Image (spheres, coloured by chain):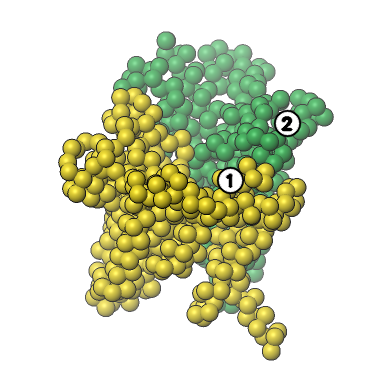
């Protein structure tokens, strides 16, 4: 439907419009947008510490974006990344706390536990969709809340002794990186970014270089044609959700083993999973696009934290900007239409 | 605790917790019946809560005791306006309805908290000066036993139940309702019969905004009595669950919302009941969601969505 140039142009225009409208909001509420955006840049890329924090923020975004994007490519909308991320988080922390193993076994085991938990959580909507044609959007939303309440219960009564947080995972299951911490003036940057980038490469290989990926994408394009070609559509639907959930669970493991190093009771969702929808859309559901979009969102989110101090602009400005970006990317039809009109007008 | 006072607490907290859910779920019924998925109910509640609280704080001295009611009207108006964004994106710009709804949720929360910080200099407003109060209904309150239980509640709880029946009448007994539903089942056929598909869908989404705003306004002025990022945390999604569990029927949605309201209040006060004290509260908290999944899967009756739900109508395309 869209030309190659448009697939690049539409996200860029959407981001530009989002930032522009963000500036208008700042002016309308009496702030200086130049100061605001300067503070945002300083707070995300200004020095080594901020860069470290930004990279740490990008890590779960990459996974959340990959999770949403993977399901999208099979024609599924996984809005349950938030919940899958939470169960992945708590599973990895649980394994981290429950065993006493050498790091070379313990850390991979804990990370894998996160992926498996996320995959299991996404298996439910997958199998319901495949077997009973239940729409995955509603089921994944409901699963988010079940995850939230279940995880809070586990933290409070099962993993900890009626505490609001679990213990810290031991060194042998931790992604914490003294090297990066020293390099970035003791930011919370950890080794997770490498796992995330590896995840993006695995995403690319599965979807673009394997016959499984071909089938998954084929089902996304046209279920009937895929069925006719002899593919097992139901199996592919479940597989897509499971892999998507595994990516989400890994995102949770990054938070549980890296950023925080423990699990805690969530009053509400972290928002990383929902932001993943924006990351996937903006990144055009391809690996490199997701990484770039995750980088952008990481910069926005991290930079936002310093905005109130430096320029007085409330942190939530970035939420508004992200919402506007989602609107424009989702409404790409109208942007493409306007681009076409613009071109015709120029001739 | 004797049985009667236990029932009294349960009924009261059920009506108290479910009124906002009923309003919002009814909004969801209108939108989804016209074929527009509305994940943005949560955001519409947020914007309703925000508008009601800000209005209440700002104009309490001017309107006195009638402030919360005027604030509800304001919340309805602003909710309706806000939902236009969803309407434009999903109907005119052909955006994915779910994505647009997600954006509505982001925008509502972002804008609400941003403005609160910009105007009040803190992440949370003060308590509202004029909240809604329990009201005794004259005469009916004097009925022995059931009077004090059923007729000493928030007026908004009764309103919610009345509005549910009005919504049923509008959707199923008027030409307008027939048109609205036809647009959600088969927009092409409706268009052929001379129904303006776009107009009907716009109206339905705006109605959902008005009711969602009302739900948020009621929630903020009865339950939280202030506005912050954590005022509305998932109530919009419970309302969405009620829409589905109620099988896209106004009275069904109301029943589901009452039931979910009961489940929510049980999770909070259940520990004072001997039978429920041993049930982990995450099970009660999760009950609405689990039941909705079971309903969708066909284990509790079949829940079929309107046929054309989630699809953008493109005029002239077959």
Task: Give the percent coordinates (x, y) of residue B48.
Answer: 64, 41
Q: What is the number of the mark on residue B38?
A: none
Cα separation, mark 1 vs mark 2, equals 29 Å
Q: Is mark 2 on a helix, strand or loop?
A: helix
Along the line of sight, the residue nearer the viewer: B172 or B283: B283
Along the line of sight, the residue nearer the viewer: A148 or B20: A148
- Mark 2, other Cα within 10 Å: few <14 / some 14–19 / many ≥20: many
- What's the colour of chain B in the image? green
**Left or right of B84 in this view: A113:** left
**Label 1, on which residue?**
A306
> In this rendering, is residue B316 above or below B180?
below
Which residue lies most toward the right here?
B62
Between circles 1 and 2, the one closer to the viewer is: 1
**Label 2, on which residue?**
B57
Residue A204: image quadrant is bottom left
Along the line of sight, the residue nearer the viewer: B233 or B110: B110
The residue lying at 70 percent from left, 84 percent from top is: A345
The residue lying at 66 percent from left, 26 percent from top is: B127
Q: Is residue A95 visible?
A: yes
């Amino acid at each position: 439907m869209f030309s190659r140039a448009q697939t690049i142009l539409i996200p860029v225009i959407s981001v530009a419009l989002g930032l522009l409208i963000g500036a208008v909001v700042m002016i309308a509420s009496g702030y200086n947008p130049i100061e605001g955006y300067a503070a945002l840049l300083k707070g995300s890329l200004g020095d080594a510490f901020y860069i470290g924090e930004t990279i740490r923020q990008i890590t779960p975004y990459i996974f959340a974006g990959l999770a949403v994007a993977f399901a999208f490519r099979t024609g599924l909308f996984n809005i349950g990344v938030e919940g899958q991320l939470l169960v992945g988080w708590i599973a990895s922390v649980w394994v981290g706390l429950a065993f006493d193993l050498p790091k070379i076994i313990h850390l991979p085991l804990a990370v894998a536990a996160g992926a498996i938990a996320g995959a299991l959580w996404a298996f439910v909507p997958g199998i319901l969709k495949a077997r009973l044609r239940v729409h995955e959007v509603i089921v994944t939303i409901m699963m988010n809340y079940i995850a939230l309440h279940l995880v809070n219960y586990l933290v409070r009564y099962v993993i900890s002794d009626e505490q609001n947080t679990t213990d810290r995972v031991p060194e042998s299951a931790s992604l914490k990186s003294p090297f990066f911490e020293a390099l970035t003036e003791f930011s919370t940057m950890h080794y997770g970014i490498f796992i995330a980038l590896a995840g993006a490469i695995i995403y690319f290989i599965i979807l673009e270089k394997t016959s499984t990926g071909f089938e998954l994408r084929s089902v996304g394009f046209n279920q009937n044609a895929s069925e006719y070609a002899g593919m097992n559509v139901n199996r592919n639907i479940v597989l897509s959700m499971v892999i998507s959930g595994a990516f989400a669970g890994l995102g949770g493991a990054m938070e549980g083993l890296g950023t925080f190093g423990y699990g805690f009771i969530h009053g509400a969702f972290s928002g990383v999973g929902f932001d993943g929808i924006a990351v996937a859309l903006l990144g055009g559901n391809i690996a490199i696009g997701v990484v770039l979009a995750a980088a952008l969102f990481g910069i926005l989110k991290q930079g936002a934290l310093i905005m109130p101090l430096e320029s007085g602009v409330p942190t939530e400005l970035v939420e508004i900007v992200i919402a506007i970006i989602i609107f424009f990317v989702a409404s790409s039809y109208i942007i493409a239409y306007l681009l076409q009109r613009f071109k015709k007008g120029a001739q | 605790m004797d049985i009667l006072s236990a029932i009294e607490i349960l009924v009261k907290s059920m009506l108290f917790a479910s009124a906002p859910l009923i309003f919002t779920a009814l909004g969801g019924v209108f939108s989804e019946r016209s074929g527009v998925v509305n994940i943005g109910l949560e955001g519409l509640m947020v914007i309703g809560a925000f508008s009601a609280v800000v209005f209440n704080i700002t104009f309490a001295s001017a309107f006195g005791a009638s402030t919360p009611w005027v604030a509800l009207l304001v919340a309805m108006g602003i909710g309706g306006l806000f939902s236009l964004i969803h309407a434009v994106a999903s109907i005119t710009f052909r955006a994915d309805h779910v994505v647009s709804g997600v954006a509505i949720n982001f925008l509502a929360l972002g804008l609400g908290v941003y403005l609160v910080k910009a105007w009040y200099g803190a992440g949370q407003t003060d308590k509202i000066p004029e909240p809604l109060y329990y009201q005794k209904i004259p005469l009916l309150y004097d009925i022995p036993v059931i009077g004090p239980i059923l007729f000493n509640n928030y007026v908004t709880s009764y309103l919610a139940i009345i509005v549910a029946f009005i919504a049923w009448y509008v959707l199923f007994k008027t030409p307008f309702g027939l048109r609205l539903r036809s647009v959600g089942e088969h927009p092409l056929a409706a268009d052929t019969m001379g129904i303006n598909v776009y107009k009907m869908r716009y109206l339905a989404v705006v109605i959902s905004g008005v009711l969602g705003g009302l739900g948020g306004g009621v929630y903020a002025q009865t339950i939280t009595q202030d506005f912050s990022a954590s005022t509305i945390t998932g109530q919009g999604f419970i309302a969405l669950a009620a829409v589905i569990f109620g099988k896209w029927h106004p009275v069904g949605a109301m029943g589901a919302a009452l039931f979910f309201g009961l489940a929510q209040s049980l999770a909070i006060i259940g520990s004072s009941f001997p039978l429920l004290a041993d049930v982990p509260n995450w099970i009660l908290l999760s009950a609405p969601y689990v039941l909705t999944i079971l309903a969708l899967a066909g284990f509790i009756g079949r829940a079929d969505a309107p046929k054309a739900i989630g699809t953008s109508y493109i005029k002239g395309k077959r």
